[in-house]
Image (cartoon, rainbow, N blue to C red):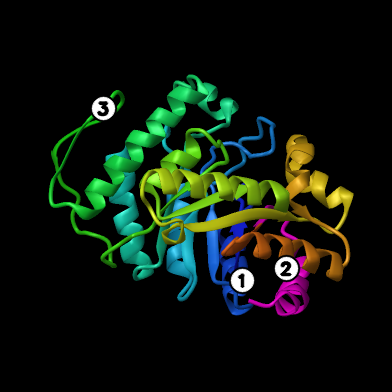
C-alpha cells in the first residue's frame, strides 16, 4: 500500500498549500491531489474556494517527486477538449507526474449557482462516459473523432502530448451499475471516498466483475480509497460541516493502533493507495503523527 494526501481547496491560500505540499513530500507520501469545486465541499454555500486547474498547476510546480492528482474533475464543468489540453500542460509542468481524475459531479449548489445544467444522475454519468473517451483520444491519438449525445470532436488535435507516453486517468465514485462499469471500461484507476473497509471491498469486487465481463484483467486497474483524518468530533465537524455524517464511515479516528487496524483493513481488502482527505484548517500535527507512527506500523 502507498499513501497520499488529498488537499481541499476551501478556506485556504496557495502559499499555505505550497508549504503543506512540500512538507507532505518531505514526509514520504507518494501522492498529493486537489479537488474540483467552486464552493466549499461541505454542503454549504460558502464560496471561499480556489479553482482546481490553477491549483493543480501550483501543485505540479511546487513539488518534485509525488504524483500530482485530481480527485476529481467534474466532467460537467469543462469541455473535455479544454480539460485534455490543460492536463497536457499540467503534465509538462510536473515532468510527467500528473494523474487525471474524472467524475460525474455532485454539488448541486455549484451547478445551479453558475447555471450549469445539473440534470439527472444518469445524464451526468453519460457526460462522464463521453468525456473520458474524448480526453483519452486527445491525449493518445494524432487526431480524434467523436460523436456523442453531449460532445462532438472532428479531426480534433491536442499537442504537445503528455510528458510520458501514457497519462493515467482515474474515475471517482462508487455507483456500482454505471460508474464502476465506466471505470472498468475506460480508466487506469478508481477512487472512492469515505466508505468503510467492508463497503470498499464490496465495491472493489463489483469493479472486478465489470472488468471480467469486459475481458479486462482487474489487476490492470489501480484501486484506491480516500479517507478522512479527524483527531476529535469537533475536528470532524470543522472539516466536513454539513456532510460530517455522510463521510463518517470513512474517517480515521481514535488512537494509533485503532487507526493502524483500520488502514490495514483497507490494505487487506486490496486498496493500493490510501489517500488522506484533509481540508482547512489543516491538522498538521495529525499528518505528522500519521507519517511517523501509522505508516511504519501498517507496512507496505
**Dot 2: element:** helix
Which corner quadrant holds the N terminus? bottom right
From the viewer's perspective, tell me whether residue 74 is left or right of residue 235.
left
Residue 239 point in image, percent of width and height: 75, 48
Give the quarter of the image for residue 39. Answer: top right
Residue 170 point in image, percent of width and height: 44, 51
Which corner quadrant holds the C terminus? bottom right
Nearer-N-terminus badge (3/2): 3
Say which residue label 3 marks: 148
Tell whether label 1 touches label 2 (CB within 8 Å).
Answer: yes
**Dot 1: element:** helix
Q: Tell me: residue 81, above or below residue 161.
A: above
Nearer-N-terminus badge (2/1): 1
| Disc 2 to disc 1, C-alpha distance | 8 Å
**Dot 3: element:** loop
Name the residue: 67% across, 64% down.
268
From the viewer's perspective, tell me whether residue 21 is left or right of residue 189.
right
Nearer-N-terminus badge (3/1): 1
Q: Residues within 10 Å of mark 2 (few under 14, many from 20)?
A: some
Q: Residues within 10 Å of mark 1 (few under 14, many from 20)?
A: many
Q: Tell me: residue 37, above or below residue 66.
A: above
Magenta segment includes 293? yes
Q: Which mark is residue 192?
A: none
Magenta segment includes 9? no
Say which residue label 2 marks: 287
Say which residue label 1 marks: 24
Amino acid at each position: 500500500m502507498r499513501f497520499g494526501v488529498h488537499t481541499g481547496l476551501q478556506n485556504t491560500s496557495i502559499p499555505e498549500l505550497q508549504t503543506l505540499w512540500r512538507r507532505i513530500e518531505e514526509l514520504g507520501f507518494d501522492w498529493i491531489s486537489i479537488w474540483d469545486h467552486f464552493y466549499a465541499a461541505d454542503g454549504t454555500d460558502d464560496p471561499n474556494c480556489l479553482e482546481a486547474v490553477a491549483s493543480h498547476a501550483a501543485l505540479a510546480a511546487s513539488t518534485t517527486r509525488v504524483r500530482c492528482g485530481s480527485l476529481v474533475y467534474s466532467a460537467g464543468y469543462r469541455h473535455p477538449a479544454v480539460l485534455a489540453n490543460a492536463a497536457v500542460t499540467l503534465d509538462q509542468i510536473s515532468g510527467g507526474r500528473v494523474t487525471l481524475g474524472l467524475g460525474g459531479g455532485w454539488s448541486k449548489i455549484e451547478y445551479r449557482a453558475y447555471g450549469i445544467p445539473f440534470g439527472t444522475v444518469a445524464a451526468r454519468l453519460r457526460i462522464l462516459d463521453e468525456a473520458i473517451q474524448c480526453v483519452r483520444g486527445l491525449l493518445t491519438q494524432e487526431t480524434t473523432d467523436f460523436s456523442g449525445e453531449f460532445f462532438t470532436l472532428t479531426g480534433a488535435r491536442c499537442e504537445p502530448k503528455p510528458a510520458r507516453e501514457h497519462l493515467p486517468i482515474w474515475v471517482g465514485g462508487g455507483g456500482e451499475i454505471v460508474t464502476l462499469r465506466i471505470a472498468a471500461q475506460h480508466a487506469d484507476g478508481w477512487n472512492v471516498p469515505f466508505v468503510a473497509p467492508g463497503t470498499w471491498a464490496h465495491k472493489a469486487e463489483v469493479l472486478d466483475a465489470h472488468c471480467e465481463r469486459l475481458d479486462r484483467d482487474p489487476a490492470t486497474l489501480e484501486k484506491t480509497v480516500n479517507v478522512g483524518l479527524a483527531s476529535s468530533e469537533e475536528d470532524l465537524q470543522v472539516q466536513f460541516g454539513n456532510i460530517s455524517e455522510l463521510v463518517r464511515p470513512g474517517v480515521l479516528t481514535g488512537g494509533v493502533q485503532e487507526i493502524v487496524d483500520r488502514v490495514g483493513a483497507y490494505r487487506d481488502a486490496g486498496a493500493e493507495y490510501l489517500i488522506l482527505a484533509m481540508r482547512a484548517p489543516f491538522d498538521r500535527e495529525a499528518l505528522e503523527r500519521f507519517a511517523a507512527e501509522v505508516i511504519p506500523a501498517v507496512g507496505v
